[in-house]
Image (cartoon, helix red, strand yellow):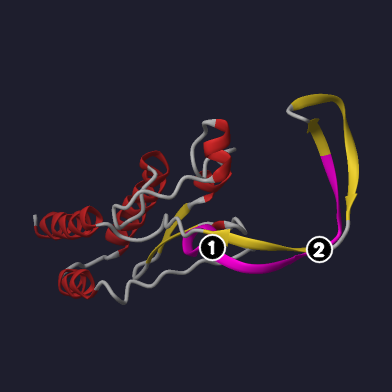
Amino acid sequence: MSGVTLSISLGGERRVLDALDGIAARLADKAPLMRDISQLVLTSTQHRFETQTGPDGLRWQPSVRALATGGVTLTDTGRLKDSFIAASTADTAEVGSNVVYAPPHQFGRSGIEEVAGHTRLIREAFGKPLRAGVYQTVRPHSRKLNLPARPMLGLSEDDRGDILDLAEQHIAGDLA
């Protein structure tokens, strides 16, 4: 998959990782467990777009666009939410997005950013749609960014418990 890679390690999730190591060692085939974990995390990540909360349970700061239009933060076209996919192997469970603006929204971003010159299609002026789009050349410039972090990826307390429950279910199924 090309594009931007966003990787979040669960190194700080020692309790979950230690429990999973012990449980996984008793499984003959860990691939089904890893597949189910990746699907659980994917579902949880997508649900955050509906609840507007991060894995820590804190609500996302509303975006300027959402406030202005009465819309939903991080859900203008749905491209970001729909871009997340789950992948797994016998030893890993992954959830990620190839959308270039996923990391700035996950971690936040501030400072000065250089914008290259480009052509822009304008379809609306003064709040009214134009009959035909107009192309406008935009010169190179810099802009100040202050994008707050709105974490989508990560494990909530519920996710941690659900992952351990999944692992126990897989062991019970293996032993049955």
Q: Residue at x 36, y 53 (%)?
A: 54
The stretch drawn in magenta includes residue 48: no
**In the foreground, 6 or 69:** 69
| Image quadrant assignment for residue 121 | top right
Q: Residue at x 42, y 57 (%)?
A: 151
Q: Quadrant of the C terminus?
A: bottom left
How would you rate the neighbour count of disc 2 (Cα within 10 Å): few for under 14, some for 14-19, many for 20 or more? few
Residue annotated with mark 1: 103
| Mark 1, secondary structure of its residue | helix
Residue annotated with mark 2: 141
Amino acid type of the residue tagged 1 in the rendering: Pro
In the image: residue 152, left or right of residue 115 = left
Amino acid type of the residue tagged 2 in the rendering: His
Image spot of residue 64 (x, y percent): 56, 44
Query: Does residue 46 sit above or below 105 in this rendering?
Result: above
Image spot of residue 69 (x, y percent): 57, 32
The stretch drawn in magenta includes residue 108: yes
Q: Which residues are magenta?
A: 103-121
Report how far apart the C-alphas of labels 2 and 1 lie in the structure: 23 Å
Q: Quadrant of the N terminus?
A: bottom right
Total marks shown come to: 2
Q: Earlier in the sequence, mark 2 or mark 1?
A: 1
